[in-house]
Image (cartoon, helix red, strand yellow):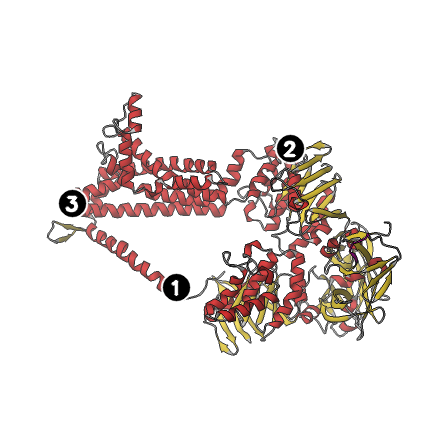
């Protein structure tokens, strides 16, 4: 079916275009500019070519951070997607509890990243934090500042707490769009609870889950605030993710060249991965 | 007067509408008849100005309006779904196009009440659309289209979502309502019987082409080609290939049930087809020209095997097998015939149609 | 396969029904034969869907019992009743093949795989879907999907009844023909008890041996298509079955004589009309002949609908529709006569027969 044909529509999009140009394209060009030059201040620039890129790609520090990024994304996806789907499956479909549920679920999503970090730090305190006190009383040594494993648990817990409800809400939207007749038919066919999930609910949720997956992947890959607030990237480099490292290099050490090269590599990785996920998952969709 | 001159529509390399010429007169009712995906909706959108044609011109009263978007044309549309403003009363719904055009409230009130009376909506003016029956909701949507006094009113299968009894009543009412207006009405439908009940003109559509345009009954009785004949028959027209040899059509067919050797069956050429040349033809006969009872003395008959009978209240459709071809005949009243019987059926060959190998109708068809 | 007994069933959606009008379904008390094809026909809101849901177990009736083969199933769930249902919109398992869709109900019931194969192959043939067995179900057209929904019921041998809820709604008119007659043949081949809900008379009359016409929460007539056409028990049946519907005139009855406007007809029997009851005469458009004799008629419009003509006219101050043949002549000074076999007399909308 054709679209309504009207040239004026372009004027409507123009402001958005200008904003995007100012906020994304121009800074990006600046970054590209930094990544191929060297500077010692005073606005003096020297052509550095691909040197910064070579340096970044050769550094263990970069690969270590990249590895941690992947590990983090995989872990939170493995937790949040199944957990979100599970919550959605158990949410009510009718009555006043629906709105209550939706409001409660939406609450974490409204809290800014750094506040989430602060909340967790408070909760985990052994003197006034509920969870921290409980763990401490049980005699379990839990020290996110000193122990890398505990630091990871803290950061992952923050993300899961913060974002699982997004997955759950998206999955729920997919679930409620399934007509009642499907459930009735499945009952008549004698389908088990699992079959209903496998052959009706999962196929119908596929599209929204793809979106949830992409959103959560890209977002988690850009993780910054939580480790910055909670662990500061430590102990050691155990929670130093690419973004954390990037800020350290750029702002802490003022090495603009390597930092710029790194952010471009970082950007390209995200772009590439998103594209791969998207094509693989949509192709699946067509073949099925 | 709305003219389409060589209008076509190609989307992404796919031709939705082949170059089409059509002239619709002011005050006329025009039916676009064809199966789903025949291009009815595409053509309506081109007429409305919702889409711009790939080639050709759309003229209104002689003026080229090809590039003029729908907002600037005086067009109203009614869809299969009942589209009304759910939070407004029926009155406010009907009044909405007039409010937009900035008429004064006394005029609006008069017009709304007039149209509501015509559409038999007066008792429901204070109700919300969703509290009404489907028929009343669709009448509200129609009233909105009519009150606008649009020069062109497009209706895309407006009765498809109604119960058949309501549909029957609306079909009877609509031509009166249309006649009282003065706009050009274009009415898309998939159902031949709907076209016939509405009357007016009909353009039969098939695969993005208008195969014939003319007075509805004339198109039905004298289809120009096989495609039109097929589009304009429900149940489908019965066809069979034959060869004209002098005064006879020779049909090669295995008798009743398709068993055994093919048998030559001859059929006298009726007077109205005497003029056509010898050679291969496709014969066509509408279901109501086949019957269980002799329609006139010495009407030709054929042996067939019965299949299911379908009963449509006042009429019955008896499906039969002639050889391995499935034919349908229409009988008045309830005729429930057991399947699997060998019976004789009669052909009213006064209404026989013949089409050449190219699918075009041969000679003048009977009226 | 089962005989279905509807034992004094009533249903109200509100809590405490007091008047007959509070019931979505007024008293229904019938027995439906094993292997029969029944259609529930009526306009929207007549209670037909409520009745279907009571049979399928989605709705528990406020009063009365439902029995399958004499066994009370009123309090059993849908699954426990062993019924199959085809819905308005086709329900298929998109990610499965056509074959797996049909095998699904059997596999869920732990039927051995070799038996599954024979059953499914048989049904695939019956539905003319054999060549699509290995295709994914999502690529199919609406009519093929609907056949699969039906097939999942047919494939089971333990089914008590197959219920259809307006199954042809999303099917193209040209394909409705095919599917309708296939359904009828499938019923003949399978001998399942089938209940078909529709508001479309053609679907109901074609499919069913017995049509159950419902109006305003009650069953007004159960009969064969011929009975519904020739002897409508209620004026609503006359109106609802047939297009155009039956013409109904208010009349005065005196013995065998019936006065309609200025004319008097002898109906051959003395209809029993109680005191204060409204007497009416019903006659279908097909049983009226236009000629030079009979009652004077003023014609408003003649609609040529191809296979026949519908004459819209006025008789005794009332609008009537009359069906005439394709080539028939209509005289300049038209009169109309009624054929005896088409005349029905009604007292307060219910038919009074010769036998009464």
Residue that numbered label 3 is attached to: A254
Above/below status of A119 relative to B239: above
Mark 3 — on which chain does it sit?
A
Sooner in the amino-acid sequence: mark 3 or mark 1: 1
Is residue C276 part of the magenta span, yes or no?
yes
Chain of the residue that carries numbered disc 2 in the rendered image:
C
Q: The numbered mark 1 sits on a residue in which chain?
A: A
Question: For residue B143, what is the image quadrant?
Answer: bottom right
For marks 3 and 1, give the CA distance.
45 Å
Q: Which of B23 and A263 is in front in this view?
A: B23
Question: With respect to residue B29, does C59 lie above or below?
Answer: above
Q: For mark 1, what is the residue?
A: A9
Q: Give the range drawn in magenta.
A: C274-280
* Residue situated in front as seen by the camera: B46 or C298: C298
Instruction: Point out the residue furthest to the bottom here.
Output: B62
Q: In 3D space, how far apart are the residues under numbered discs 1 and 2 (Cα atoms)?
A: 60 Å
Q: Name the residue under label 2.
A: C75
Few, some or many residues within 10 Å of mark 2 (<14, 14–19, 20+): some
In the picture, the quarter occupied by the N terminus of chain C is top right
Residue nearest the viewer, comparing C355 with C132: C355
Please tell me how crowded label 3 is: few (under 14), some (14-19), or many (20+) other residues with Cα within 10 Å.
Answer: few
* Residue B5, image x, y percentages: 53, 74
User: Which mark is nearer the camera, 2 or 3?
Assistant: 2
- Which residue is found at the position 58% from the left and 44% from the top? C91
User: Is circle 1 on the same chain as circle 2?
Assistant: no
The secondary element bearing badge 2 is classed as loop
Q: Distance between the residues labelled 2 and 3?
A: 77 Å
Using the image as rendered, state which of residue A141 and residue C276 is in the foreground.
Answer: C276
């Amino acid at each position: 079916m054709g679209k309504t044909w009207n040239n004026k529509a372009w004027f409507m999009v123009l402001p958005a275009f200008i904003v995007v140009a100012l906020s994304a394209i121009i800074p990006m060009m600046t970054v590209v500019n930094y990544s191929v030059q060297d500077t010692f201040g005073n606005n003096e620039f020297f052509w550095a070519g691909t040197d910064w890129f070579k340096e970044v790609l050769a550094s263990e520090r970069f690969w270590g951070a990249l590895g941690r990024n992947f590990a983090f994304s995989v872990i939170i996806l493995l937790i949040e997607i199944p957990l979100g789907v599970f919550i959605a499956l158990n949410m009510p479909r009718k009555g006043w509890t629906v709105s209550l549920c939706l409001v409660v679920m939406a609450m974490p999503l409204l809290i800014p990243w750094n506040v989430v970090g602060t909340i967790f730090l408070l909760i985990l305190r052994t003197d006034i934090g509920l969870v921290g006190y409980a763990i401490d009383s049980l005699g379990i040594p839990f020290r996110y500042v000193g122990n890398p494993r505990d630091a990871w648990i803290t950061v992952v817990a923050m993300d899961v707490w913060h974002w699982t409800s997004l997955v759950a809400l998206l999955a729920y939207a997919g679930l409620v769009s399934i007509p009642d007749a499907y459930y009735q038919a499945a009952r008549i066919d004698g389908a088990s609870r699992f079959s209903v999930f496998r052959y009706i609910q999962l196929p119908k949720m596929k599209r929204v889950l793809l979106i949830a997956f992409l959103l959560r992947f890209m977002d988690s890959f850009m993780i910054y605030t939580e480790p910055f607030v909670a662990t500061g990237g430590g102990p050691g480099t155990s929670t130093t993710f690419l973004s954390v490292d990037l800020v350290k290099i750029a702002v802490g050490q003022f090495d603009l060249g390597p930092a710029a090269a790194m952010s471009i590599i970082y950007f390209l990785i995200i772009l590439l991965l998103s594209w791969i996920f998207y094509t693989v998952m949509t192709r699946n969709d067509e073949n099925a | 007067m709305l003219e389409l001159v060589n209008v076509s529509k190609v989307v992404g390399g796919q031709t939705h509408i082949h170059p089409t010429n059509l002239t619709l007169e002011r005050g006329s009712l025009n039916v676009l008849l064809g199966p789903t995906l025949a291009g009815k909706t595409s053509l309506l959108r081109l007429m409305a100005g919702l889409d711009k044609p790939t080639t050709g011109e759309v003229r209104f009263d002689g003026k080229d309006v090809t590039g003029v978007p729908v907002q600037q044309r005086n067009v109203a549309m009614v869809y299969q779904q009942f589209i009304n403003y759910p939070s407004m009363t029926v009155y406010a719904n009907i009044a909405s196009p007039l409010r937009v055009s900035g008429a004064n409230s006394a005029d609006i009130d008069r017009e709304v009440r007039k149209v509501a009376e015509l559409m038999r909506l007066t008792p429901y003016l204070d109700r919300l659309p969703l509290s009404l029956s489907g028929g009343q909701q669709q009448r509200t949507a129609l009233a909105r289209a009519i009150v606008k006094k649009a020069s062109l009113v497009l209706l895309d299968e407006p009765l498809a979502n109604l119960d058949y009894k309501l549909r029957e009543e609306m079909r009877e009412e609509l031509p009166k309502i249309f006649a009282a207006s003065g706009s050009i009405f274009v009415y898309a439908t998939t159902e031949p019987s709907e076209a016939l009940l509405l009357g007016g003109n009909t353009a039969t559509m098939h695969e993005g082409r208008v195969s014939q345009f003319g007075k509805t009954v004339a198109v039905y009785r004298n289809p120009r080609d096989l495609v039109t004949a097929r589009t304009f028959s429900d149940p489908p027209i019965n066809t069979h290939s034959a060869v004209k040899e002098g005064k006879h059509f020779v049909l090669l067919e295995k008798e009743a049930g398709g068993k055994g050797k093919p048998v030559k069956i001859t059929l006298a050429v009726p007077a109205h087809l005497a003029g056509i040349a010898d050679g291969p033809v496709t014969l066509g006969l509408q279901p109501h020209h086949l019957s269980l009872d002799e329609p006139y003395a010495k009407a030709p008959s054929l042996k067939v095997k019965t299949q299911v009978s379908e009963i449509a209240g006042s009429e019955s459709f008896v499906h039969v097998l002639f050889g391995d071809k499935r034919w349908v005949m229409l009988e008045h009243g309830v005729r429930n015939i057991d399947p699997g019987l060998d019976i004789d059926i009669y052909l009213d060959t006064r209404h026989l149609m013949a089409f050449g190998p190219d699918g075009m109708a041969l000679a003048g068809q009977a009226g | 396969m089962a005989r279905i007994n509807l034992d004094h069933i009533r249903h109200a959606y509100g809590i405490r029904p007091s008047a007959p009008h509070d019931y979505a379904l007024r008293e229904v008390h019938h027995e439906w034969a094993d292997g029969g094809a029944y259609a529930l026909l009526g306009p929207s809101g007549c209670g037909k869907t409520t009745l279907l849901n009571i049979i399928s177990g989605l709705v528990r009736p406020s009063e009365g019992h439902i029995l399958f083969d004499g066994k009370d199933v009123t309090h059993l769930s849908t699954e426990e009743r062993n019924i199959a249902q085809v819905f308005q919109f086709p329900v298929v398992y998109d990610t499965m093949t056509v074959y797996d869709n049909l095998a699904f109900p059997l596999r869920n019931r732990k039927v051995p795989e070799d038996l599954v194969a024979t059953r499914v192959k048989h049904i695939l043939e019956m539905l003319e879907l054999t060549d699509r067995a290995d295709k994914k179900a999502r690529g199919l057209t609406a009519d093929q999907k609907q056949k699969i929904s039906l097939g999942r019921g047919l494939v089971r041998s333990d089914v008590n009844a197959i219920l259809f809820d307006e199954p042809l709604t999303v099917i193209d008119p040209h394909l409705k023909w095919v599917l309708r007659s296939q359904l009828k043949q499938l019923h003949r081949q399978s001998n399942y008890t089938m209940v078909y809900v529709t508001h479309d008379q053609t679907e109901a009359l074609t499919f069913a041996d017995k049509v159950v016409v419902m109006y305003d929460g009650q069953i007004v007539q159960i009969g064969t298509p011929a009975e519904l056409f020739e002897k409508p028990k209620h004026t609503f049946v006359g109106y609802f079955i047939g297009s155009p519907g039956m013409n109904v005139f208010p009349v005065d009855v005196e013995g065998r004589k019936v006065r309609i406007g200025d004319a008097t007809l002898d109906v051959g029997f003395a209809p029993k009309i109680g005191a204060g009851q409204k007497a009416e005469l019903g006659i279908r458009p097909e049983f009226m002949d236009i000629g030079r004799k009979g009652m004077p008629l003023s014609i408003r419009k003649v609609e040529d609908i191809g296979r026949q003509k519908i004459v819209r006219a006025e008789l005794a101050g009332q609008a009537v529709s009359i069906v005439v043949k394709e080539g028939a002549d209509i005289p300049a000074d038209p009169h109309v006569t009624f054929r005896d076999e088409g005349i029905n007399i009604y007292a307060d909308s219910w038919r009074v027969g010769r036998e009464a």
